[in-house]
Image (cartoon, grey):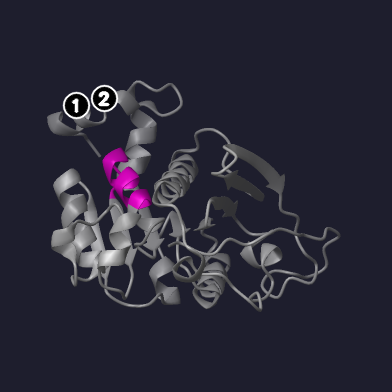
Amino acid sequence: MPFSDDEVERYARQLVLAELGGPGQQRLKAARVLIVGLGGVGGPAALSLAAAGVGTLVLVDPDHVGLSNLQRQILFTSGDIDRAKVQAGAARLTALNPHVRLEPHVARFTHDLVAGCDAVIDGTDDFETRFAVNAACLEAGVPLVSAALGRWSGQIAVFQGRPCYRCLVPDIPPEAETCARVGVVGALAATVGSLAALEAIKLVTGAGRPLTGRLMLLDGLEGTSRVVRVAADPACPACGHSIDDAGSGSAGAGGG
């Protein structure tokens, strides 16, 4: 899969990275990444992945752009209001990098969308969809990058087999927070989305150590972060069988 002269110049700063180089950039070009939810997390993730040269981005979101989105959903502009998010997003991403193939779906997530993907980023803001994405990734054996945020805090984790997302969040919290209810600072969304894209890039290229089975917790107010292990839960409703470890963790509000 040769690079055009435009691509060589476009990706020059990645091609000189020892951990990526030509082989890593080839893997990115051949990759197919699904982004579920094109909001505060999914939008910045899509921008970073398109700029990096991921070959195919599958964008899934049933919603349309609203004025209140623009405080944190930096993929869109005022001119996109009332347009379907995936259609407005696809146009912006094509303008950023015409070498990337976009597959927009103005629809809710369905299991079949995971087939053939090299990684999935879940930036949705409801737990039913998160559980469905987790189940589909488990079934297909596709790594899942899960990202969430609310107020001034965010979290990112990678799940591939056990432990899975439901080891961290076994059931829908009785008082699940949403960004619409509790608020969120816009700059945090871009940070979490970019970190989610970074994890997908590492998964695709084999560079570095992805956050597999680990949860990164960000505190924007304090300017701190920490990483904790997510253990496999023997009672997990999605992946639990006969395993010795027990898992625990916290859940953010959602993808904004």
Q: Position of residue 91 (x, y in %)?
A: 16, 57
Which residue type does callout 2 highlight?
Ala
Q: Which residue is mark 2?
A: 12
Q: Position of residue 8 (x, y in %)?
A: 21, 28
As helix, strand or loop, the secondary structure at mark 1 comes to: helix
Q: Are marks 2 and 1 in contact (CB under 8 Å)?
A: yes
Circle number at residue 9: 1
- Inspect this view and state whether residue 11 appears: yes
Q: Position of residue 156 (x, y in %)?
A: 55, 51
Q: What whole-number distance in Å separates the C-alpha atoms at marks 2 and 1?
A: 5 Å
Image quadrant assignment for residue 198:
top left
Which residues are drawn in magenta? 44-55
Extreme residue toward the right, this view: 244
Is 240 in the magenta? no
Image quadrant assignment for residue 120:
bottom left
Q: Position of residue 21 (x, y in %)?
A: 37, 26
